[in-house]
Every structure is written in structure tokens, then in C-alpha cells.
Amino acid sequence: MNPSNFHSIGTPGQPWGEAEKAVWLSHQARKRSYETDVLSVIDRLRERFDVSEYGRLDYALESFPLFAIRSRNWREDLPYALVTGGVHGYETSGVHGALQFVDLHAADYEGRANLLVVPCISPWAYERIHRWNPFAIDPNRSFRENSPAPESAALVKLVAPLRDRFLVHIDLHETTDSDESEFRPALAARDGKPFDPQGIPDGFYLVDDSEHPQPEFQKAVIDAVAKVTHIAPADAKGEIIGSRVTSPGVIEYALKKLGLCAGVTNAQYKTTTEVYPDSPRATPEQCNAAQVAAVRAALDYSLAHDR
Ligand SMILES: [Zn+2]
């Protein structure tokens, strides 16, 4: 089945049941290796950082250990910072941007912040280059107590005891052409709804928290990323993917209400990055560098404005 035909699973207008989800799952092939691409990099970081397994996903015959990377000299008196990537497994630069940040820049924050970096929250989907987990659930609508997504439940459990300690959380994502060609049509089919194309913005943007917006913080991140890659313009309606642009390159969502990863802590400063890897003007290296620039700017701004 061609990816563009996923919407043909099931009966139009009716949500998928278990049979339709099984058909969808049978078409998901493993395309790359979490072990080769991600675990090998995490292994090399063990020399300089504390790495711990915070959960494990057991799916059919496969088992995926989940890893968190921490600053070695963790001190209770320092601000806490959370960096998450790979909530959507196909969003490659979120995973590799988080790892690159740890490798190249995490040491700069020693003695200034306790860093907790979770680079690949959804490894099954990383390998399939997909958005959902094997239950056809989007982990990024599932960050809540009693989550139906094991990927989200594991992060919620890891972060829960520290939820009020974080100063800043940056969650690394991408918006891809496959969102419009594959994942949104599949979502519409799964839920028995019509597919309403929104268009894909060309460039980087951020998602702020509509319940607790921090426009100056978002601007600092946008300014840093603009030096690496271009920022998405608003469309003719003044929107990006159907949401009002509140300042250049920034839209807002109700993070906690929607069960989004960026709502998993009570940090004062929260943002979600959206890199556009399919732009003719962006290379994979640039996408990773944009994620790294965003993380550094988010940390630098929040540490300078810690109240
Ligand atoms: Zn995403």
C-alpha cells in the first residue's frame, strides 16, 4: 500500500476499530535502526553524562529501552531544564538535535543548570518513520495520567516527581510534507472525519503555551534559530497551520489541555520547536543545528530570567 492510500483503510465517515488498526499496523515496515542511530550515540555519551533507562517498550517480538541523559554534577540548588525529542519518531532532527546538543554544548551548563535530556521518546516510530505508536495512537496527544500511550506514560512517570522543579522545557519537533500527504489523512481516516488540507509552512516556527504565554522567551529562540535557518512566514490569513501567528514564527496551543509533551512540566518557560526538513532551503545538518540553536537559546534566556 502506498502511504497516500492509508486513508483508504476502513469505511469513510466511520472511526477505525481494532480490525482497521491491525490492517494499518501490518503495513508499517521497519526502515531504520534505533540501536544503530540512537543507542550507539547515547553509549558514547556515558563517559561524560549519567545515562539511565527510565522505561522499556515491549511490542510483539521487539523491546526498546528508553534512555534519559542527565548532567553528571546534579545539584538540588540549580534550576532544572528538560529537553525532549522524538515524541514523533519520524521527526529526525528532534532526536539528533537533542543528542548533538548534549554532545557539543551540555557541558557549557555545568554548575548552572541540571539538564535532563530525553532524546527519543518513541523509538518504534523512529524505526518506522511514523507519527503513531503501534496502537495507532499519537503520543503527543497523550501526555496525561493513565495515558493510553506507553511512550507518554513513561515520560510522565519520569518527570512527575520533578514537575514543579523545572525552569524550562523545550520539546523538539518537525513539520514535514508527509504530515499533509500521509499523517493527517491517516488521522482523519482513523477518526472517521473528512481530511481538511491546511498546507505546510516553509520554515521554522515555535508553539508557545496559550495558557501561559512567554513572548519574549519565544522571540529569543526565534532570533537564535533565524541565524541558522529561515523562519516560517504567516499565510494569507495571518496563520501557520490554522493557528494565529502571535509574533513572527510563533503560534500558541493549550499545551496541558491537549496532552502535549511541552505541557508535561510546570516550567515557567516552555516551547515546542517545529523544524521544516523538506524545505528546498534546508539540509539535514541545518535542521539539527536549528534544534541545537533553539535549545541553547531557550536555556540561555531562561537562566538569565530565572525569578
Ligand atoms: Zn511532532
Image (cartoon, rainbow, N blue to C red):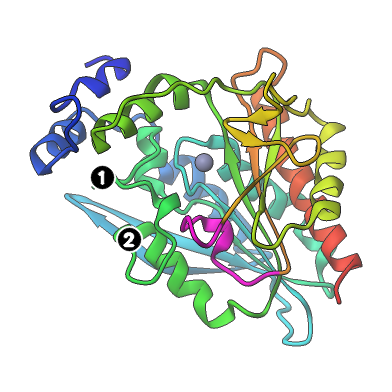
Quarter of the image with the C terminus is bottom right
Image position of 21 with respect to 238: above or below: below
Is the CB atom of the residue marked by disc 2 within 8 angstroms of ligand 1's nearest atom?
no
Q: Nearer the viewer, residue 192 or 88?
A: 192
Decide whether residue 152 is among the magenta residues.
Answer: no
Q: How many marks?
A: 2
- Residue marked by disc 2: 150
**Badge number at residue 134:** 1
Image position of 305 with respect to 224: above or below: below
Residue drawn 65% across the image and 56% down it = 209
Left or right: residue 259 compared with residue 71: left
Magenta residues (range): 255-267
Residue drawn 86% across the image and 59% down it = 300
User: Quadrant location of residue 117?
Assistant: bottom right
**Badge number at residue 145:** none
Labelled pair 1, 2 in contact (Cβ < 8 Å): no
Q: Nearer the viewer, residue 11 or 281?
A: 11
The residue type indicated by label 2 comes to Pro
Residue drawn 69% across the image and 62% down it = 212
Decide whether residue 266 is among the magenta residues.
Answer: yes
Q: Secondary structure at mark 1?
A: loop
Q: Position of residue 216 (x, y in %)?
A: 86, 53
Residue lying farthest to the bottom in this orientation:
76
Query: From mark 1 to mark 2, how far is it between C-alphas?
Result: 10 Å
How many other residues sit within 10 Å of disc 1, few (<14), some (14-19) or many (≥20)?
many
